Structure formats: structure tokens, C-alpha cells
Image (cartoon, rainbow, N blue to C red):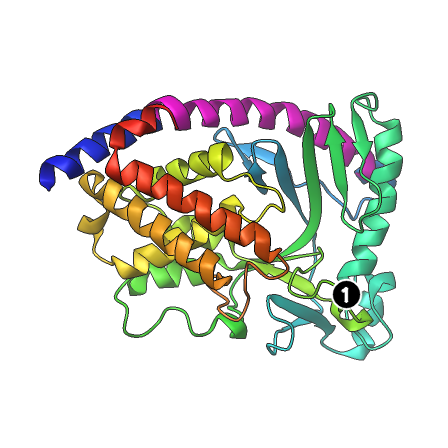
Amino acid sequence: MIAAQAKLVYQLNKYYTERCQARKAAIAKTIREVCKVVSDVLKEVEVQEPRFISSLSEIDARYEGLEVVSPTEFEVVLYLNQMGVFNFVDDGSLPGCAVLKLSDGRKRSMSLWVEFITASGYLSARKIRSRFQTLVAQAVDKCSYRDVVKMIADTSEVRLRIRERFVVQITPAFKCTGIWPRSAAQWPLPHIPWPGPNRVAEVKAEGFNLLSKECYSLTGKQSSAESDAWVLQFGEAENRLLLGGCRNKCLSVLKTLRDRHLELPGQPLHNYHMKTLLLYECEKHPRETDWDEACLGDRLNGILLQLISCLQCRRCPHYFLPNLDLFQGKPHSALESAAKQTWRLAREILTNPKSLDKL
């Protein structure tokens, strides 16, 4: 048993060195290329409208606010200033979303974003995005990369196609620190020892983001109040939870397997699903020793089997917001074919670790 485990870990480490590192290097190169173009567009936006200040900056060879959705798709979060005069309200009526309401009607004129406040005092995510979209469209025509960048039409999101190969979504957002959403109040679960009180305090202090984007839990049934809502996002908090042990290595392997074998019609699986299931696996295996290098194979198998189960049940709850289903709106047939393909992959890796040389 231990010999089989060791063999799988050896093959996974080889896979990590050969496949995952190559994927990382290729993505890093793409990011540099894409960020040059996006920075230029955002500089042009800022000239027209100083309230939209580019927050895209490189820190220790990492771009702050950039998420890799897939090797050809990225999201850049543009942090806006001065949320001050608004109260954050999440009463659970919109899973995964919250609203920003004026704390006092008399403060309307004091807000930097006065023309985006609705009659009932909400700061409208949709109105801000619509204004931003107009500015980006103009900036694309003026910027020095105008020959290689195009705005993607027929979407309310701000999406750019770069060199016909890459897609970047630019999402206006507010950073919220020092508060924790009521809809995530059940975290951490009282009977689970991971991640421990110190890490919990760090994560809650890190806070979360409010993004101006279409909330997929509301697609198809958006009233105006709902389209004024902001989407909750916990990227920094999640990254902090995945520090230590072989967690990030495990995530790298999962992302590489997804990119190479689970990029399916109907796009049922994203890297974010992998990250979510890894967080649940951390709860199931709360001891740090469960994440030693020698356990990499066991943890990976656990996550792949959990993924199959979620695909078969057609439900994958968000880690912090369990009422939000990350498979909502995905075609059932796409989830079924993903379950079959994941099962083939898991069986292959488990029964014949050497197959990783070909995967």
C-alpha cells in the first residue's frame, strides 16, 4: 500500500515539474503580454474619467487583482475608491450578492459616485459597469494597442479580446475589509478544527470584494434591484487558506488536469470549482500532517472523487456561501459528460500512476 502511494506521489511530482510548471510559465508569459495591453487601455480610461483609477500593479512578479480563469481567459479586478457613505447589506435574499445602500439620504451629494445612486438610495453595480463599458470602448479605439484589442459585444460585462487569442474581463469592484458578510457567518463550522482561530482571524481581516458583474445565481430572472446588486468574491481569503503543505501543488495539478482533459462543451468545470473542492478537502483533513508531500496522491484522489459526486448530484456549494450553487445554470448534459470524463481520469491515475506521463 505504502509502495503504491509512494509511486503515485513520485509520478505526481514528476507531472508537477514537467506539466504544471510548463503551464505556469506559459501563463506567466501570457499575463505579461495581456497586462501591457490592459494597462494601456486603463490609462486611457483614467484620462477620460479620473474616478476609474487603474489598480493593476505588479508586486513580486504577481499582478495584484488578476485572476486566471483558464490559460486563455483572465479577469482583472479594478478597485474603485471611496465606498465610505454606503452601508453593506446582505440579507441572503440574493445568493452570492449584496447591495450598497446610502447610510443617510443627506449624504447622496457627498458620494464620489453620485450619478450611479438609484432613487431608493442604492449604488447600482449595473450603472457603474455601463459607464465603465462606454469608457473602455472609447479607450480601445484610442490606445496604442488598438490593432490587437477589440471589445466583445453583446454582453453587459467589459470583455476584451486580445490578439484574437485571449479574453480579459475587467470588473469594477470595491474592497471590503474589517467586516464579514452575514451570508458567510456559518464559517468556520464550529465542529471542524481547521483552519484554527488565528488563521480565521487573518482571513476575516483580509475581507472580501464586491464585484460589478452579472451574478450567475440570478441569470434569467434579474429585476432592476437585482442588477443593482454586487457579487461577493473571496479570492484573497481563499488564497490565504491554501498556504502551507502541498495544498497549492495539489491545486496546480488539478488545474493542469482540468485544462488538458476537462475543457468540455458547455464549460461545466472551471478552475474555481477545483479550488472550492480543495478547500472542502482541507476541512475533511484538518491536520497539517495530512498535507505533507507524501499525502499528495491521497488528497488528489479525494478531491477527484468528490468532484464526481458533485457533478452527479449537479450541485457544488460555494465554500463561504453554501446557499450559492456553483453549478447553477450549467447544462445537465455537460455536467454528466464531465462526471464520466472525471471518473475515467481518476480511475486511470489511481490504477496506473505511470499514465500521468501521457495525461
Q: Position of residue 194 (x, y in %)?
A: 28, 62
Q: Quick check: can you spot residue 106? A: yes
Q: Residue furthest left?
A: 2
Q: What residue type is labelled 1?
A: Ser
Question: Is most of the magenta stretch helix, strand or loop?
Answer: helix
* Residue at position x 82%, y 70% in the image: 224
Is residue 285 inside the magenta stretch? no
Q: Where is residue 66 in the image (x, y as percent from the top left)?
A: 58, 40
* Residue at position x 36%, y 62% in the image: 200
Image height of 350 relative to 120, above or below: above
Number of residues whose C-alpha sits closer than 10 Å to that of mark 1, classed few (under 14), some (14–19) or many (20 or more): many
Q: Position of residue 186 (x, y in %)?
A: 43, 74
Along the horizontal axis of the image, is 156 left or right of 298?
right
Q: Position of residue 320 (x, y in %)?
A: 47, 64
Q: Quick check: can you spot residue 64? A: no
- Write down the region rendered in magenta: 17-45
Image height of 14 relative to 322, above or below: above
Image height of 128 relative to 146, above or below: below
* Residue at position x 25%, y 41% in the image: 297
Q: Mark 1 sits on what residue?
A: 227
Along the horizontal axis of the image, is 247 left or right of 77?
left
Viewport quadrant of the C terminus: top left
Residue closest to the eye, 80 or 331: 331
